[in-house]
Image (cartoon, rainbow, N blue to C red):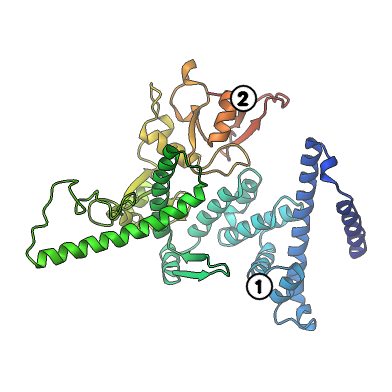
Amino acid sequence: MLLDRLSRITDQLRSSVADLDPETLSGPDAAKLLDAFAEIERLASAGTLLAAGRVESSNVWRRSGHRSAAAHVAEVTGTGIGPAISTLETARHLGSLPATDEAVRQGRLSGTQVKEIAGAAILQPDAERALVDAAGQQPLNVLKLRCRRVRAAGQDQRATYEAIRRARYFRNWVEDNGAVRFDARLTPDEGARLVAVVAAETERLAAAARAAGVDEPRKALAADALVGLVGAGAGARDDVGARDDQSRAGANTSRGAGSGSDGPSARPSAGVPRVESGCGGPAATVHVRVDHAALVRGHVEPGELCEIPGIGPVPVEVARRLAVDSVLNVLVTDGVDVTAVAHAGRTIPIALRRALVERDPECVVPGCSVSEHLEIDHTVPFAEGGPASLDNLARLCHWHHYLKTHHGHLLERSDPADGSVRTWRWIAPDDPPVVPGHILRSG
């Protein structure tokens, strides 16, 4: 009987974990053990999902005294009501998604992956197989972005955007030790602008910290950037009010550039930057990827995209609105043929840079999800005649770029003939050689 067999397996697993002493394992054995436990976790997640669906449909939760099936699942799994509701929704979808159901039962999908895929594929069943395949080849954040694209294609984007706008909020609370915490829900464009402004100011603070020899975590500098920008915004409003008062009093407020606090580059206090909010320059740089036909037409058709990379789809009219008060970098997909862009020098042309950002939203090394401060790598080194072309470039994080350039690590790239997802393999110097394949040399 299944329950008896699972009970024996559980007892054996419990005993194995109790006897496990990680310090006695070699590195390779620890890696193999990690793989084994990860597979067990995926299979257990699959079993939990399937059993939870039956708990709901059988109404057994009523007999056990729970207020809902979600409450029953939450108590047993030790999660909250929200995750339990999500689990039950996913379980309901599985019956209509055969490829996802098969992958779940084989232990090929984590709980998070299956929830993302099911939520998107139930709206666009034709995309199901591609999403399941992508789950085995791409990091979770890339899979989530693909699922957001699929969900957007199966929904009214304007209605979805307006629903997010109506549900927007900003909350704050104080922890027991006095620390102030925040939580916010914003539309994709407003969120992207906020992130862009904070990121730009964080860069400025990081450069100043390096120059001063101060070692601060980037997340701490980001917090400083947010606080500084809020203060700068208040200072800018105070300056505007003061100038209005002076104008009403007939005072002459005209000054030379840089001579005081009234110029566009003024600072309300030393070391705090002015936020140029509608008076002297754009507030942020936001990147948008949009199909040319959609940009002209004003809305997307099936197969077209209008999205903020790393965040997700937005209505075309939102992208147009961003251009009013932000620097809007647009990658128009059928404008310049970016696949053919090349350059004789080492400098990467802007069209090619944008194409790389679109193709490689994060470090291409498998398992690396770093998406900020990526570096462009010449796969065939520039000194050896490697061109500045899309096929000879890839974006890597600083760490993997360093290993590839100075420590003999390699990338193997696969470009499937059927046009499916490009895959990469990271090869350490002591890994066995792999042939055939397209080996990208360090550079």
Q: Nearer the viewer, mark 2 or mark 1?
A: 2
The amino acid marked with disc number 2 is His
Left or right position of 250 against 210: left
The amino acid marked with disc number 1 is Ile
Left or right position of 50 against 181: right
Q: Can you say which quadrant of the picture contains the N terminus?
A: bottom right
Q: Indicate whether 47 appears above or below 284.
A: below
Q: Secondary structure at mark 2?
A: loop
The reply to whether callout 2 and callout 1 are in contact (CB within 8 Å) is no
Q: Compare residues 152 and 35 and report the one nearer the observer.
A: 35
Please tell me which residue is depicted at 53% across the width and 52% down the height of the picture. 145
Question: Taking the image as drawn, is residue 323 in sight?
Answer: yes
Question: Taking the image as drawn, is residue 385 in sight?
Answer: no
Q: Which residue is mark 2?
A: 407
Q: Which residue is mark 1?
A: 81
Q: Compare residues 367 and 159 and report the one nearer the observer.
A: 367
